[in-house]
Amino acid sequence: MTLKKVNAIEVKNVTKVYRSSNTETRALRNANLTIYDNEFFTLLGPSGCGKTTLLRLIAGFEDITEGSINLFDQEIVNLPPNKRPVNTVFQQYSLFPHLDVYENVAFGLRRLKKDESLTKKRTMEVLELVQMKDYATRKPNQLSGGQQQRVALARALAPEPKVLLLDEPLSALDLKLRQAMRYELKTLQRETGITFVFVTHDQEEALTMSDRIAVINEGEIQQIGEPEQIYESPSNKFVANFIGEANLLSGFCKTNGENGLCELYTGHSINLFVPSHIKQNDKVTIFIRPERIKIVKSSKDKSQLSISEFTYLGNAATIQLKSNEQIINVNLPIEDLKVFKKGDYVDIEFPKGSAQVID
């Protein structure tokens, strides 16, 4: 029997407008989404797209212009931040420099007037959870960036919020530490069972950590789905280009029907699902990932495509094919590195199910 999912957060028709004396900026436009309990949910998009604004609206740090937000079926729009069962971990960890690690984590519990024995027990529990128990007496300036982040997480987790909001908490870390912390955060979310809402502009972070992702651009939610769905079946050109690498190839529809035949301007034909609103001879854009395309050697007489650029990456390579002013990027596996070189004429193959018509 499938267990019914519990809605942790419901964002309904939310719009946020910032107004000054002469200007009006619409940071969010009619946003709708549902985040489930015990889910690692990511708000993903470029800088200035509205993802942090949405997080701040959930936290109560900004006022909503239109719409409503429910937290576990309770309307929270009119609740002040300290009355909402959420906590936030910011990009800057904002630890108190004059307090040691223990006192930083215990601070929130003391503000809630928790019993001192309960405060001590809970503080040590969360420090152990984030592997910082042995650092309880150290000051923040004696910790590395990763250790400070763990303390900030422990402080946010200590009051046992129903939802933890994380605003790009890994961006200040170096690459290796950032990669390690991704898995630690995901493990922490599973162990605590708390709903995590994570804001990032990093596509790799979103794909590796999330149960589901909402892709946002210019204040509008473009697509919501599981990482594989977002990557394999983007809903539009923005999502296709923003998540990973994408080829968006021009062509036209040769036949009607779901299993339509499309022809690229490179001269290649491909059978794939064609949406019902697209008719015969309509121009189309076909989406395919560089790693999905297969290439074989050809001759100048048989192929219009040649390798114009060849980028060696150590364990793989990226090549650029050019034909009729249309560029196609292909990722080659390591075993093919010695087979192809710049200037080679090639032909391409599209494995079944690897491409789609995209609006």
Image (tube, grey):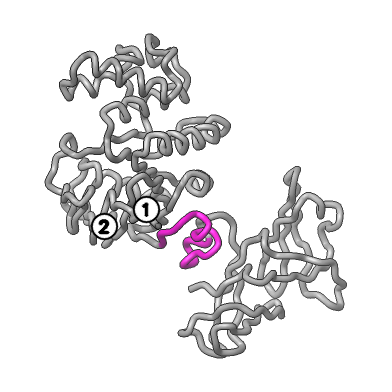
Say which quarter of the image contains residue 289. Answer: bottom right
Label for residue 124? none
Residue bearing the label numbered 2? 26
Q: Nearer the viewer, residue 252 or 278?
A: 278
Residue type at numbered disc 2: Arg
Look at the image and give the residue range highlighted in magenta. Answer: 223-240
> Residue 59: horizontal and vertical position, in percent?
24, 41
Residue at the image position 36 percent from the left and 24 percent from the top: 126
Q: Pick out the residue farthest to the front.
A: 1
Residue 229 shown in magenta: yes
Q: Nearer the viewer, residue 192 or 70?
A: 192
> Residue 235: horizontal and vertical position, in percent?
46, 67
> Residue 218: horizontal and vertical position, in percent?
36, 58
Residue type at numbered disc 1: Cys
The image quadrant where one finds the N terminus is bottom left
Residue 69 shown in magenta: no
Say which quarter of the image contains residue 169. Answer: top left
Query: How many residues crowd around disc 1 within 10 Å: few (fewer than 14), some, or many (20 or more)?
Result: many
Q: Is residue 234 left or right of residue 110?
A: right
| Location of residue 163 with respect to 177 vertically, above or below | below
Look at the numbered disc 2 and give the secondary structure of its residue: strand
Between the residue at mark 2 and the residue at mark 1, the CA separation in whole angstroms equals: 10 Å
Say which quarter of the image contains residue 188. Answer: top left
Q: Is residue 328 left or right of residue 93?
A: right
Query: How many residues crowd around disc 2 within 10 Å: few (fewer than 14), some, or many (20 or more)?
Result: some
Label for residue 49? 1
Look at the numbered disc 1 and give the secondary structure of its residue: loop
| Location of residue 306 with respect to 44 vertically, above or below | below
